[in-house]
Image (spheres, coloured by chain):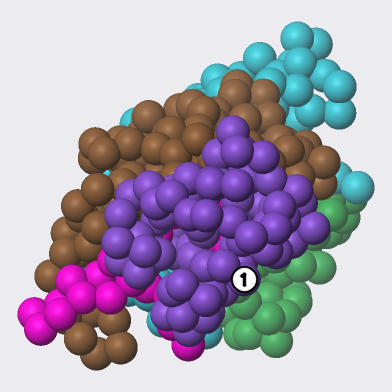
Chain colours: A green, B purple, C brown, D cyan
Amino acid sequence: MIVKIKTFGISRDILGGREVSMELTGTSVGDLRKSLSKQFPALDKLNSLFIAVNQEYAPDEKVLSATDEIALIPPVSGG
Amino acid sequence: MIVKIKTFGISRDILGGREVSMELTGTSVGDLRKSLSKQFPALDKLNSLFIAVNQEYAPDEKVLSATDEIALIPPVSGG
Amino acid sequence: MIEITEQLIEVQKVIEAASLKEAGAINTFIGTVRNHTSGKRVIRLEYEAYEPMAIAEIQKIIDRATLQWPLTGWAISHRIGTMLPGEIAVVVAVSTPHRKDSFAACQFIIDSLKQTVPIWKKEFFEDGDQWVSAHP
Amino acid sequence: MIEITEQLIEVQKVIEAASLKEAGAINTFIGTVRNHTSGKRVIRLEYEAYEPMAIAEIQKIIDRATLQWPLTGWAISHRIGTMLPGEIAVVVAVSTPHRKDSFAACQFIIDSLKQTVPIWKKEFFEDGDQWVSAHP
């Protein structure tokens, strides 16, 4: 499955674009994490990395579909 | 000694004036309390009554002089 | 800035008086006149202050706050005279480098102000009036 | 009111959006851009937000606050885009019947906002830049 990933903050610098398409092995958020980690090892150096699906923080177990809005949430620093 | 006493809040209603002169038996804030209590028993019904001397809260031991600025401080309710 | 005034309090002015470019955090407390007390409708209030002593007592509170928190600025404005429900009676603003301190210092100042500063309010109802907190 | 804006935040407007005649107490937190971080001078900042999710997360925080405190009003405005030191990045205002609740609720909201709301800031120094909190 190919998913589109929105990027923000430092994750945009690491992935190199506002929206990046990735071929996913597996179907869960956890699988996406593994693919990201392999392709962009700099992500592992962040304080944290959450994945949002349809604008909600998603657990690793969550199963993805091709139409989901997926976004990387590196450590937030608002306020 | 005759002292002038400024009144505020409910103490003004009880003493009946913005500034009241009183003949004082004794010289301390504690003596003033006793005189006030005798002459204006309604003061004893208040939640609290502090006496300020020269714009500072004064303990009962404080000795008064005729030129001191004396004020009654019934329970405050600012804010 | 310490201000006791019969005029409407301008919140923005108080906040600006407490602000500093280096601050980072500004906490502001606004106390307004409630329109009821113990179920009775409040028509209006009268506030009075023993002004020079009130200013001196507020200054003491600020001095104590300054010992406990790294205040970069502060301002307190208290209104006196006749007030209507909804109107602003008091504004406290403090600035500090970090937000936690701004909350703690502002709360300390308003809590202390209500305990020690010689200001009194009288509530007027449809059927009478009372000096607040005077009696048990 | 929840607002994410590229414009200067008008504090007065946020306070008014949170106010209610019945309130009694209004607490406001203002976060400004500090002019230095770890001893380095900050020239400017860039804030960005994942806007729809940021608004949804702020709404969740408000919902949680509403369960804990009797909020009579609230308003949150967060600025994004380019900001200079001294400028206001965020304003949170809440009103409650009693003052203690106004402090607790406002602090809860700003603390939570900093933990969960997808907004990021990048600091620019004379000799470089960094995404705040990204790395250990």
In the rendered image, the residue lying farthest to the top is D126
* Picture coordinates of residue B26, whole percent (x, y): 70, 58
Asked whether the viewer can see residue C55, the reply is yes
Q: Position of residue D100 (x, y in %)?
A: 54, 71
Q: Residue at x 33, y 49 (%)?
A: B18
Magenta segment includes C131: yes
Circle 1 residue: B34
From the viewer's perspective, is residue B78 above or below residue C23? below
Task: State the SS at label 1.
Answer: helix
Chain part drawn in magenta:
C114-136
Seen in the image, is C113 located left or right of residue D98?
right
Place residue C78 in its image quadrant: top left
Chain bearing mark 1: B
Query: Is residue C95 in sight in this rendering?
Result: no
Q: In front: D125, or A35?
A: D125
Is residue B6 shown left or right of residue C129? right
- Can you give x and y, in whole percent of width and height, for residue D23 in the image? 31, 69
